[in-house]
Amino acid sequence: MDETVVKSLYTPNCQQEAINLLSKFAANLPGIIFQVLQQQDGSVLVLYVSSGCEYLYEVEPEALQADFRVIYNLIHPQDIKAFTESIAVCCNTVTPWHWEGRIITPSGKLKWIQGTSQPERQEEGAVLWNGFVLDITDRKQAEEKLQGSEARYKAILDAIPDLMFRISRDAEYLDLKSEGANITLSREEIVGKHVQELLPSDVAAISLEAIAKTLDSGTLQTCEYQLTTPLGVRDYEARLVVSGEDEVLAIVRDITERKQGEIALQNLAQKFAKAFSCSPDSITISTLQEGRFIEVNDSFVELSGYERDEAIGKTSFELNLWVDDRDRLNLLQELQATGVVRNLEVEFQQKLGKIITTLLSAEVIDLDGVPCILAVHHDITERKQVEAQFRLAAQRDRLLAETLVRIRSSLNLEEILQTTVTEVRQFLQTDRVFIALNNTKLGIRTLAESVDPKYPSVLGWSTNDEAYLQEVRNLLKDNLVRVVEDITEMSVSPKVQAHCRKFQTQASLAVPIMLGNELFGALIANECSGSRHWQPIEIDLLKQMSEQVAIAIQQSKIYQKLAELNTNLEHQVEERTSQLQQKMQEVEKLHRVKDVVLHTVAHDLRTSVMGNLMVLKNLLNQGLGSREAGEQGAGGKGEELITNPPCPIPNSQSPILVSRSIIERMIQGNDRQLAMINSLLEINSGEKPGMDLKPEPVDFSILLGKIFAQLQPMLTQNQATLKNLLPADLPLVMVDTSRLDKFLAHLLTHSLQNNPPGLNFILSATVEGGMLRTQIQDDGVVMSKLECDRLFDLHVRDPQDCCSTSIGLKMYLCRKFIQSHGGEIGVISNRKRGLTFWFTLPLATSSTTNRP
């Protein structure tokens, strides 16, 4: 900065402006610079407060200037008294003011602050306060964290206002008060020690002199010194007063922040000037209204290309710095709204015309009564270029990854090629991208293309001109990548030139597609709007994409052959699978029938045979017993007990009287086994394709009436009743009448055998969707859902139920009978009592009723 300008900042007429300018530059200091005038009548006028007020107090500087008492509302209730007293003492004595305390910001944050000021009595009697307030919260927190340290000098180095020592004239520590202080030495390690034992020699010498002066003069003595601490070099202030005969009381405080603030305030102008001139970033001061430059630094000259004499007195518009004039307008609007702008990204034009990108930070300052803009420009042009390269690289990697995924997941070569040229053109932002393939028979032809609609398309173009083909092959063969930035500068044949003119090609980038050592085709990008510089990352992208396209072509050929083989193999596998499934179903049915037959033979038939054997053996034993009894009777020794004739020979044939009940039991057992054997035979015949049925159209209501009339003896025997609710006008149904009676008998038998006598049946029927649905409901016992679902299945039953297998076979035959008619059958367990059997049969149609 010019020396005249620096001096002008400190003239009496522009003192305020200099403070404003310097405080703007010192905005990053963790504190506030203030200037307060206390007039003779006691009123307080805030002349200046720096922008750090907003950070420290969370209060706008204007609000504080309007009413200084805002500060009182922020001070912690426990510290307000000390603050008020310190102000009063300073006002009365016009001595330096120093105070530390806590504040609570509007957002609820608790902060420690330290205030320091040097009051000056003015000629008219007013007092001018120049000072600063620092945020010492971090220091307070650091002091708390250092409590555990065992450093020998910690008690002295980290002295706080509450730390007090009683010291004798001989410089021996007599006592100390360290409550709340950051002191690690115990009382025993300090009391009784000499000052020279605990303090460095230079500090000890100062202390000895201060002790002697205090005792000799009997007045307050103050000394300042520095100590090297773990936190760095710190400044301390010791105040000594006489506390007794030949002893003093020393109060030690850390004044490092105050010293730093004083030095910062004294050297602020010098630092600003040095920072202004030496800053690596461009710094300018210009008028707010016109943008006319008042001062610029050397970095601005280097960044813009304009010498300092060329810029001073000129506006930014006269130098043509703004690429977009609206950026200047946006800057002014933001400054008017908030007074500050941070990191606004704008583009500027250098003297030679190069466009650069900077981050602009600015604030409004007042310089000699003229509103000005203090602006800092940080050049980020290289960073933006690197970011652009990173974005291009990321896009390239993404494009390559997506292409690789498509190649691995898709067999559609046409789709892969079309997607490739589309995304490559979008990445390159060029006018045309296409893929041309080379074929020894068909020549060169274009298979896929993405082109700007403004320019002609090459899709479908082909040629068999051998001379043209050979020239193109040589271009790609001799140069693995053919880069042409301006087609007019390329040395080619007239045919190639004519081709370029036809399709308006101005620049070209061609990469061969190689399959092994064979030139299979090329991936080509064209610029039609003018010449173009192809960047290395763009060339690298096309090279990698051509490799992926080559892989896709090879993969497509392999997959095409593999698809043909898979088609034949899948057809064979389907045939074999179908045959195997059919055989497995047949085997499964055979196993199911086998299980039922084995169970029947192993349990039910065995039980019946054993019963017959027991009856026969019993009869035989009765016969032998009768013969012995007859012999006794003949001898006159006893009365004849049986009427059977005697059997003189034990093993000879002899008649045996058998009771009717035994014969009836044998007949019933054999009938049951015969019925079971017949059921098994019927199941076996039913499992064969095409059950032998002879359905015919019948009046179902009349037919059921006849069948239930025949079943009446069975109902009577079991004391059961049947209530027939069949409508008289039921339509004709198709059913095999010869087997329907047996089917109904099986359903009734199931209910009769599983319930006590006295069962009641209700018969009903309805027409639903071309089928006749018949229901037989009883009021007997209920079944679980699992039992209902499995009732009509062919499976091994509970061996504890003597009739379970025979009934199960009949239920299975019932379902086969209904399904053979094209109907369905089921059973529903009623909520309160009983079961409801239902089955459907097809209605007779006109074609079936007219059939001979």
Image: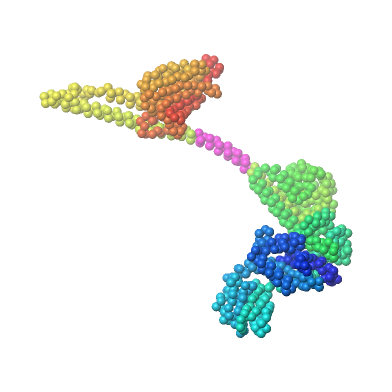
- Position of the N terminus by quadrant: bottom right
Q: Which residues are magenta?
A: 561-582
User: What is the chief secondary structure element of the magenta stretch?
Assistant: helix
Is 540 inside the magenta-drawn segment? no
- 577 shown above or below 78: above
Q: Is residue 197 visible?
A: no
Can I make out residue 774 in this image?
Answer: yes
Q: Position of residue 598 (x, y in %)?
A: 38, 33
Instruction: Give whichever of 177, 617 is nearer the camera.
Output: 177
Identify the residue at horizontal 40%, vertical 33% (top origin).
Answer: 797
Tell me which residue sits at (65%, 42%) in the image: 560
Taking the image as shown, residue 316 lies to the left or right of residue 198, namely right
**Which of the two residues, 59 or 221, is positioned nearer the viewer here?**
221
Q: Depth check: give the residue in front, 192 or 289.
A: 192
In this rendering, is residue 320 above or below 186?
above
Residue 813 x %, y %: 44, 26
Q: Residue at x 58, y 39 (%)?
A: 569
Residue placed farthest to the front in the image? Answer: 41
Foreground pick, 464 / 326 = 326
In the rendered image, residue 109, in percent from the top left (x then y), is placed at 66, 61
- Residue at 50 percent across and 23 percent down: it is 773
* Percent of width and height locating residue 351: 86, 61
Name the side, left or right, on which 447 lies relative to 243.
right
Residue 607 location, quadrant = top left
